[in-house]
Image (cartoon, helix red, strand yellow):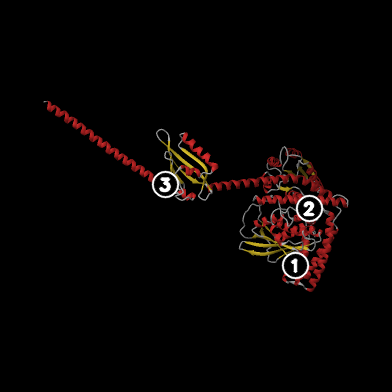
């Protein structure tokens, strides 16, 4: 019994042990299998990590904090130029390549992150390349911790952001430069405004005084004041133009215009300056130059006036000649070449290189002797560049030729649509200008809004001499009060005034009109930028006059708007009135609105033209076509400058006959020319040169 029981116990124990062993074996097998799966997963994860590090452009690193070993992918060599042997797999190698000025802050930031139990770190610093230069680095890393939150591993990547940093620096520099240019432009505009305001008084009062009875010595003094003020105004305009060009804010118009007209306007502006130095000012336009082109006549005239003015300035005897040639063309555009030749002092070859540089002249004595800012040629070069042309100078020791080319659209070709600066002022034919009846002028009431008392007096005096009734107020609120009491015909509005400025006042006037009678508002402002003009028009003003306000421009603006708003103000015009032999408005402008100079210029014109017509008569009699063309061209140029409009037409016809060799018409044309010249002489003899106003007969 006992052995059997013992045997049963042994069997039971043996079965239990065997079962436990089998279970343990299964557990061990499962553990081994789990470990194998874990190892495989780790191996696969590591493989994916290695593959990923190859796919990126960053330098990837894996830092074992406990062993201080660092693994790098190959980009550490590619990005920074190191060989595999030069890369030391320790954190010390990495630290020593951080820029000394950045090293402490980088190490401190890493330690701070590790101690703070945070899992992410990033920093920007400079890292030394193999060639000794430094790359700008964005470094980012993830911190791995054990169960006790101790950092045991850190994995991250270094991105070279040198290019982005350069681009950001360039962008910042560009923005800073643009802001600097904007501030400079704004500063110059503000300074221009502050200078133009008193200049308006200086020039205006001087013009008024020159039209009064003064002694010859007083007239000489006043002329010096006027010329000095004009010179200062030219300097202001040059600096403003240069600033606009630098800031890229210079606007170009696109208008159909005649190159011949621009040449004539240029010579008209400068003929008196040339005559004062006893210089001959002439022009020549080749036959293949088209009658009309499309571009900006104002900017073209600005370049020509600069070059011709310089030529006159630096020429003491002889003359200055303007020539226009056809250069080249495409289907839609053509290039014209303009040459200004003088017989002046010449320019040494070594000095020509600096001619078109800003604030530079041939030598330091030039400014003292001749004046100027040294900006004229620099501005001309920039304007020519903007017209897709080139500019240069040729000089042979005595005399110089300044030339430039400019590209224009052909009239009739597809027209581009750049922004054009237009005031929206009505166009009044020349034949209808400045013929408002005297009694109507007396009935016209003009309100002047101007806070500067000196400028108030200038404009009031100018308007009264034109025959208009005028009142003056000092701010926009007073304008509105005055317009409640009196139905003014025109408001001359300064833009910068206390209490209520001109912009707000104009807007309020338009609001109150409410489709009632439209009162023309003409801005008078020392601000001369296009954006200032646009601001005036946007506020409801109709026209724009920049200070200093000249009497001819003021009268022209008033005539345009008064004629446009009230046809009854026009004097009756017949065909004879429309074809007056002399346009005294042009002639007086050439004479600087000075009656004494007008008489001198008239005498000089009659003497010169008499001699020219005598030579022309002989050329017609002998059938000398070349002489007919040359003399008629010269006489037409001087006549155009002085406003002899019908005589110019006849001379142009005669010039063309000489050019074409059609001599049969020349005797009849010459007879008409003589008749018209007699009309001119009678008209000039009837002018009241002692008048103090506008030389109307």
The image shows residue 483 at horizontal and vertical percentages of: 74, 40
The answer to whether residue 270 is visible is yes
Q: Quadrant of the N terminus?
A: top left
Q: Quadrant of the C terminus?
A: bottom right
SS category of the residue bearing label 2: loop
The answer to whether residue 520 is visible is no
User: Reading the chain from its start, which is encountered first: label 3 or label 2?
Assistant: 3
The image shows residue 282 at horizontal and vertical percentages of: 76, 63
The image shows residue 226 at horizontal and vertical percentages of: 80, 50
Residue nearest the viewer, comparing 516 with 538:
538
Per the image, the residue denoted by label 2 is 435
Residue sitting at 56 percent across and 46 percent down? 168
**Marks 1 and 2 in Cβ contact (< 8 Å):** no
Residue depth check, mark 3 versus mark 1: number of the one nearer the observer: 3
SS category of the residue bearing label 1: helix
The span from disc 3 to disc 1 (Cα, nearest Å) is: 86 Å
Vertical placement of residue 285 versus 65, above or below: below
Q: Locate residue 303: give its quadrant.
A: bottom right
Residue 52: mark: 3
User: Reading the chain from its start, which is encountered first: label 3 or label 1?
Assistant: 3
**Marks 3 and 2 in Cβ contact (< 8 Å):** no
Per the image, the residue denoted by label 1 is 655
User: Reading the chain from its start, which is encountered first: label 1 or label 2?
Assistant: 2
Vertical placement of residue 284 versus 123, above or below: below
Mark 3 crowd level (few <14, some 14–19, many ≥20, 10 Å Cα): few
Q: Locate residue 201: give its quadrant.
A: top right
Point out the residue furthest to the right here: 215
Residue depth check, mark 1 versus mark 2: number of the one nearer the observer: 1
Q: Is residue 36 left or right of residue 456?
A: left
The span from disc 3 to disc 2 (Cα, nearest Å) is: 88 Å
The span from disc 1 to disc 2 (Cα, nearest Å) is: 33 Å
Residue 66: mark: none
């Amino acid at each position: 019994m006992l052995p059997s029981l013992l045997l049963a116990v042994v069997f039971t124990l043996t079965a239990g042990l065997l079962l436990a062993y089998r279970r343990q074996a299964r557990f061990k097998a499962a553990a081994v299998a789990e470990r194998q799966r874990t190892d495989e997963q780790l191996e696969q994860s590591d493989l994916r990590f290695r593959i990923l590090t190859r796919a990126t452009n960053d330098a990837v690193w894996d830092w074992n904090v406990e062993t201080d070993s660092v693994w790098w992918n190959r980009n550490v060599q590619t990005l920074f130029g190191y060989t595999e042997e030069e890369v030391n797999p320790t954190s010390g190698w990495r630290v020593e390549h951080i820029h000394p000025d950045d090293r402490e802050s980088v190490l401190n930031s890493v330690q701070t992150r590790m101690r703070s139990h945070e899992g992410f770190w990033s920093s920007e610093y400079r890292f030394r390349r193999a060639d000794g230069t430094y790359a700008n680095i964005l470094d980012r890393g993830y911190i791995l911790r054990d169960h006790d939150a101790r950092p045991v591993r850190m994995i991250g990547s270094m991105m070279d952001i040198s290019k982005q940093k350069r681009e950001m620096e360039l962008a910042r520099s560009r923005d800073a430069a643009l802001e600097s240019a904007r501030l400079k432009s704004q500063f110059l505009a503000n300074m221009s405004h502050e200078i133009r305001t008193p200049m308006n008084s200086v020039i205006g009062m001087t013009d008024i005084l020159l039209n009064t009875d003064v002694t010859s010595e007083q007239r000489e003094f006043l002329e010096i004041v006027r010329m000095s003020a004009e010179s200062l105004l030219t300097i202001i305009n040059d600096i403003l133009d240069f600033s606009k060009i630098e800031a890229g804010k210079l606007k170009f118009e696109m208008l159909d215009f005649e190159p011949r007209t621009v040449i004539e306007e240029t010579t008209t502006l400068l003929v008196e300056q040339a005559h004062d130095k006893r210089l001959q000012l002439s022009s020549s336009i080749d036959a293949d130059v088209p009658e009309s082109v499309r571009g900006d006549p104002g900017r073209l005239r600005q370049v020509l006036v600069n070059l011709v003015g310089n030529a006159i300035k630096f020429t003491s005897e002889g003359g200055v000649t303007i020539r226009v040639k056809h250069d080249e063309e495409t289907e839609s555009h053509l290039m014209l070449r303009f040459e200004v030749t003088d017989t002046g002092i010449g320019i040494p070859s070594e000095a020509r290189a600096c001619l078109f540089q800003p604030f530079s002249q041939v030598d330091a004595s030039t400014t003292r002797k001749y004046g100027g800012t040294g900006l004229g040629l620099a501005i001309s070069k920039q304007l020519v560049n903007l017209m897709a042309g080139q500019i240069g100078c040729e000089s042979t020791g005595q005399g110089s030729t300044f030339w430039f080319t400019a590209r224009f659209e052909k009239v009739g070709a597809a027209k581009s649509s750049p922004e054009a600066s237009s005031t929206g002022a009505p166009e009044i034919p020349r034949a209808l200008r400045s013929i408002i009846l005297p009694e109507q002028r007396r009935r016209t009431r003009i309100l002047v809004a101007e806070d500067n008392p000196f400028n108030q007096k200038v404009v009031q005096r100018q308007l009264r001499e034109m025959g208009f009734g005028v009142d003056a107020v000092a701010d926009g609120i007073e304008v509105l009060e005055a317009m409640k009491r009196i139905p003014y015909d025109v408001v001359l509005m300064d833009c910068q005034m206390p209490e209520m400025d001109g912009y707000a006042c104009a807007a309020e006037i338009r609001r109150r009109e409410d489709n009632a009678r439209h009162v023309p508002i003409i801005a008078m402002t020392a601000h001369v930028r296009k954006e200032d003009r646009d601001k005036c028009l946007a506020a409801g003003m109709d026209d724009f006059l920049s200070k200093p306000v000249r009497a001819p421009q003021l009268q022209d603006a008033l005539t345009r708007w008064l004629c446009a708003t009230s046809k009854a103000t026009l004097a009756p015009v017949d065909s004879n009135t429309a074809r007056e032999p002399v346009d005294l408005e042009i002639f007086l402008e050439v004479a600087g609105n000075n009656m004494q100079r007008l008489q001198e210029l008239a005498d000089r014109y009659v003497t010169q033209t008499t001699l020219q017509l005598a030579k022309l008569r002989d050329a017609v009699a002998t059938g000398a076509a070349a002489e007919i063309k040359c003399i008629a061209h010269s006489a037409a140029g001087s006549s155009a400058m002085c406003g002899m409009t019908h005589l110019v037409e006849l001379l142009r016809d005669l010039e063309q006959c000489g050019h074409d060799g059609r001599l049969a018409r020349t005797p009849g044309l010459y007879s008409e020319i003589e008749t018209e010249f007699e009309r001119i002489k009678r008209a000039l003899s009837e002018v009241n040169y002692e008048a103090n106003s506008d030389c109307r007969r």
